[in-house]
Every structure is written in structure tokens, then in C-alpha cells.
Amino acid sequence: MKIFRLGVFIFLVYLLQVAVVSRFAIFSVRPDLMLVVITLIAVTQGVERGFASGFLGGLMQDVLGGMYFINFLTKGLLGFLVGTFKESIFGSEESVAVTAVLVATVTEFVLQVLILSLFFDKPVATPLSLFLLLVISSVFNCAIAPILYPLIRASAPYFAEE
């Protein structure tokens, strides 16, 4: 039942991403609300919920967005990694929300560029444009993290195992 609640929550985050957050863009770069939520769930609730939310969120983005299952791979992996290394690398929960989101944004960006260029033969943009996209995306995601952190922290009892 808890995984169903998590799935509904992730679906609502996806709808919010598509309906509201996608309207905010700088140089056609939009904040990745799903990445921020998955990272914060992994930080607050651990590896199992981080992986489950990454798996569900990435799969939802790919299936409903018509992607190549790139989000499914990268977001599931990021949820797992952030949940696994949250205390050993980042420190305590309160101090890591923005840092974890920054690391997750950079990691997902690099993974997606590598997957698209190596497996799908998609052309890679110039290094300067990639760097600018990464910086803008990181700023967007890190600005959203402190706003969403209290919500994710307060919702933890609804998704945790009994």
C-alpha cells in the first residue's frame, strides 16, 4: 500500500512538472522537479524509497514523455546512489539537501549525455553549450530543493514501511 502512495505522489509530481514547472525556462532549460523530489526522498527516506521513487519517476517520464528509457535508468540509479551514500559522503540530512541535488543533477546530466551519444548516436552539443545547460539546470534544481525539502520530510511517514 505504501508503494502505491509513493506512486501516486510521483504521478502528482510528474503532473506538476508538466503543467506548471515546464513553463519556466531559461535558454530552453527547465528545472527537473522529478530529479529534485527523487533526490530528496532518497536523502530523507533511504535507499529503498530512493530507488523506488527513481524507478517510478523515471519510468513515468519515459513512458508518458516518449523517451528512450533514459530517465528510467538514470533516475533509478541516482535514487539508489543518493540513498546509499547520503550519510557516508554527504553528511547529515539537514545539510545535504542542496548538495545532494547538485551532485544528482550533474551526475544525471553526464549519464544522459553519455547514453545518448554512445548508445543512441545522438550528436553532442559543444562543450560550452553543455556547460551552460548544466549550470542553468543546476541553479534551477538547487533553488527548488530548499522549498521542497520540508514537504518531502513531512510526507516521509506516508511512504515508509510500517
Image (spheres, rainbow, N blue to C red):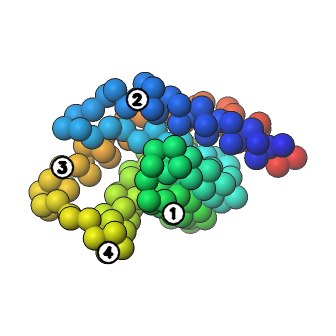
Q: Amino acid at mark 2?
A: Val
How far apart marks 2 and 1 lie (CA) works out to 23 Å
Q: Nearer the viewer, mark 1 or mark 3?
A: 1
**Disc marking residue 118:** 4
How far apart marks 4 and 2 lie (CA) works out to 30 Å
Q: Which residue is mark 1?
A: 73
Of pointers 4 and 1, the one earlier in the residue sequence: 1
Q: Is residue 27 above or below residue 106?
A: above
Image check: 127 left or right of 94? left
Q: Amino acid at mark 4?
A: Leu
Say which residue appears at 62% left-offset and 50% top-offset. 56
> Is residue 128 or residue 69 the one in the foreground?
69
Q: Dot 3: what SS?
A: helix
Q: Nearer the viewer, mark 4 or mark 3?
A: 4
State the quadrant of the N terminus: top right
Q: Position of residue 157 (x, y in %)?
A: 77, 38
From where the camera sits, is residue 15 visible?
yes
Q: Which residue is mark 2?
A: 21
